Amino acid sequence: MSKTMTRRGFLRTSAAGAALAAAGVVGYAEWQSGRAHADEGSAASGDVKRVSTLCNGCSNECGLWVNVRDGVIHTLEGNPDNPNSGGRMCGRGHGFAQMTYSADRLTQPMKRMENGEFEPISWDDAYAEISEKLMGIIEKNGPQSFAFIRDPRPNINFYAPRFTAALGSANIYTHGAACNLSLQSAYKHTVGGGFSADVENAKMIMFIGRSYADGITPASMKKLAELSVNGDAKIVIVDPRFNNSGHLADQWVPIRPGTDLAMLLAMSHVLIEEDLYDKSFVNDHVLGFYAFKKEVEQFTPEWASEICGVGADTIATLAREMAQAAPAAVIEPSWRAAFGCAHQNSFMTGRAVAAFNALLGNYGQKGGALITSSPSLGKLPASKFPEPPAAKGTRVGNKEYPLAVPFMGTNLAALKGALDGQIKAMFFYQSNAAKGYANPKVWEEGLGKCELVVDIDVQMSETAMLADYVLPECSYLERMEAVYTLGGKKHTVSLRDKAIDVIHPETRPADQIFRELSAACGVGKYFDFTVDELVEAQLATVGLTVDELREKGIVELPTSDFEYGKVPEFATPSGKIEFYSVTIGRAGLSPVITWQERKARPAEGEFYFVGGKQSVHSHTMTTGIESLMNISKDYHLERLWMNASDAKELGIAEGDTVEISSSEYTDKIDVHVTERLMPGVVFCPTHYGGSSPYLKQGYGFGICIPNFQPFDMEPGTGATMSQEFTVSIKKVGA
Ligand SMILES: Nc1nc2c(c(=O)[nH]1)N[C@H]1C(S)=C(S)[C@@H](COP(=O)(O)OP(=O)(O)OC[C@H]3O[C@@H](n4cnc5c(=O)[nH]c(N)nc54)[C@H](O)[C@@H]3O)O[C@H]1N2
Ligand SMILES: Nc1nc2c(c(=O)[nH]1)N[C@H]1C(S)=C(S)[C@@H](COP(=O)(O)OP(=O)(O)OC[C@H]3O[C@@H](n4cnc5c(=O)[nH]c(N)nc54)[C@H](O)[C@@H]3O)O[C@H]1N2
Ligand code: SF4
Ligand SMILES: [Mo]
């Protein structure tokens, strides 16, 4: 059976959507006119309320206040008490609220028919059919033939693992393999977990392929802007591209993609060779320093310069300046593009970042690298609400990729499992895996081999198009969820609350979907509670009631144990920062931090390829939002960046169309000629190239980067290696 959406199927379901709209459901246009109406009669308009909730435009989940007039979302404001938003919202947050009123939303459960087309199905029938198929698959192949992949947010982090465990499967994954699995795993095995940079107090800060002004979190952006304007701190951006944070920086260090490790090793070489490292910190808190010292003897700035393209003097000077500013000097932990899941040496690059910070002795210091705790919440009383036992099996992928952070795992192992017949049923929640976690044609093949694919989404994403059943969740403004906690220097709790009633009567919140679906699967006893009961139990241990939290929106807890100057505990096997790791050695990788090449290197005439975020979009999911896509279209944000000298050589001018090819794929795209990118590298935003005809705004606009990426996984972690390919470029039109 073909799982590719047919044009006819698309038209038929649009007709179903139109029928709903005709039945009086509010659409985007009606929302706008409703808002205008509410504005006109603001004094007279009856019901005005302010609801505190959390944005769902990205994983930052900023706290916000929603102003609701006459039951319609009117405006959104950042909640000033929220450490993630600092009282601000980004453009995506405002734009994404329109999802609630989007005409492209899913409004009813959909089922793929024998002929490959989607038809509406009732919830009861959907639950009955899904549970029968799922339980049949599990009975025949065992619970380990079922896998669940989700974007990890607090609410689904409660429901999805519980559902998976209730069915006896250990195969629960996050999207991490396509985000920051490599570096989070590196930090876990080197310093015991993630860390943050104390931006506001830094005297020198280096960003390696991390741009606060593009991959936005409002609070970080505000801190960086303040540091740049008010302070005398030195801000360094290491990036093949002069990204938008470059405007706030003191120095741009262009570097060849996937070679940051060479520069980091050479900077460590300088600190050790010139006796500039923090000896007492290293003595007390580092394991394997002498093995590392011996290793980096060979990694001189001259050696690194040949590989990464940064001048040897620049490398040595940067290392010395960092040492001089230490301990208020830090390499920011970064997030995705450079070494979150990009290259075969991304894990090693993360280790080298953690090690360089250790040489500066900056852990726990003002302006350095901070390891902080998070608040812990109460649990549902097991006596009243039975908890499923932990699954007996080992998660698929854990054996081959033992270094992956356990919370994340590698979802690509589930895909491999589907390809080789081990996984037969796959569920997705808020996850467009088939468009963004690895090459889409491999997902299409893997999901095509599954006997059951279920996707819970708010719109007909590319992954939904490959599913057998698509279950429509109501939007984030129409539901209440489990408690959200934020750790760090301060501890806070907040709530995603329901701002308005459900607009489309046949959409449901996740808690209801899991309660009903688990009952259909015969494991309903593990979900026999309401979301209110869950929240109440979670808040019990922090001494808050739901109403108190609702009223304040965000509540700071008095219990953070953070203190500057206190060296944190390193949750590694040795309790020290491990420059040498037995665990990593056992996994078949070098136990000591050392040099490792990237895999794909351009042949003569080819280019390195780098991707990155744009401030107005989140991954793939905002490309259905009209107001955000209008910005992309008006400013041609989809274009491929190319250095002016490269363009000249290839006879390419601004706006020309080129053919771009990798080993996997060829497409066409217009070029933006710029000096903001080093020669030999091309850059493209990651958001575009939508292929779901249901999402009309983004359909066919720009290129989809994962199409160009071979299917491959990083050794040790199983991350996707999103930039391990090179491209050739040819002008095809002016
Ligand atoms: N092509 C491409 N791939 C990428 C990236 C990229 O920018 N482009 N970014 C990478 C990174 S850094 C990450 S973290 C991952 C992110 O990967 P994902 O978390 O999968 O992010 P999206 O691709 O935006 O897909 C999110 C899906 O959730 C759906 N959704 C939105 N709101 C809701 C909701 O309230 N409920 C439910 N049930 N569904 C909802 C959207 O419609 C969409 O289909 O992707 C990685 N892969
Ligand atoms: N606007 C927006 N903001 C977001 C998100 C979003 O989708 N949109 N998603 C959130 C999420 S989940 C994530 S993971 C973060 C991502 O946040 P970031 O990791 O900061 O995001 P990117 O823009 O992907 O990458 C930043 C820079 O890395 C550079 N780069 C690429 N390869 C290399 C390399 O090999 N070496 C070096 N030194 N630089 C390189 C790119 O040129 C780019 O300018 O953003 C978060 N915030
Ligand atoms: S950064 Fe923007 S999109 Fe993300 S949660 Fe905050 S306001 Fe929403
Ligand atoms: Mo991410």
Image (spheres, grey):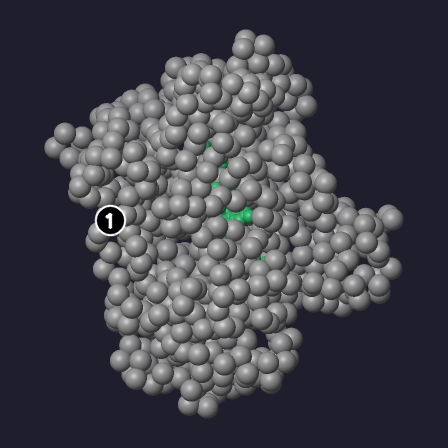
Outermost top residue: 23
Does 111 appear above or below 380? above
The quarter of the displayed image where residue 333 is located:
bottom left
Q: Residues within 10 Å of mark 1 (few under 14, many from 20)?
A: some
Q: Residue at x 60, y 54 (%)?
A: 612
Outermost bottom residue: 274
Q: Residue at x 39, y 62 (%)?
A: 196
The quarter of the displayed image where residue 328 is located:
bottom left
Q: Residue at x 61, y 62 (%)?
A: 247
| Residue nearest the viewer, comparing 396 with 624 | 624
- In the picture, the quarter occupied by the N terminus is top right
The quarter of the displayed image where residue 355 is located:
bottom left
Does 23 appear above or below 466? above
Does 717 appear above or below 190? above
Left-right relation of 485 to 94: left
Amino acid residing under circle 1: Leu
> Does residue 590 appear in this view?
no
| Residue nearest the viewer, comparing 296 with 458 | 458
> Does residue 327 appear in this view?
yes
- Residue 484, given in percent of the width and then of the height, sits at 33, 42
| Residue nearest the viewer, comparing 58 with 463 | 58
Q: Residue at x 36, y 46 (%)?
A: 81
**Residue at image mark 1:** 557
- Residue 89, given in percent of the width and then of the height, sits at 49, 43
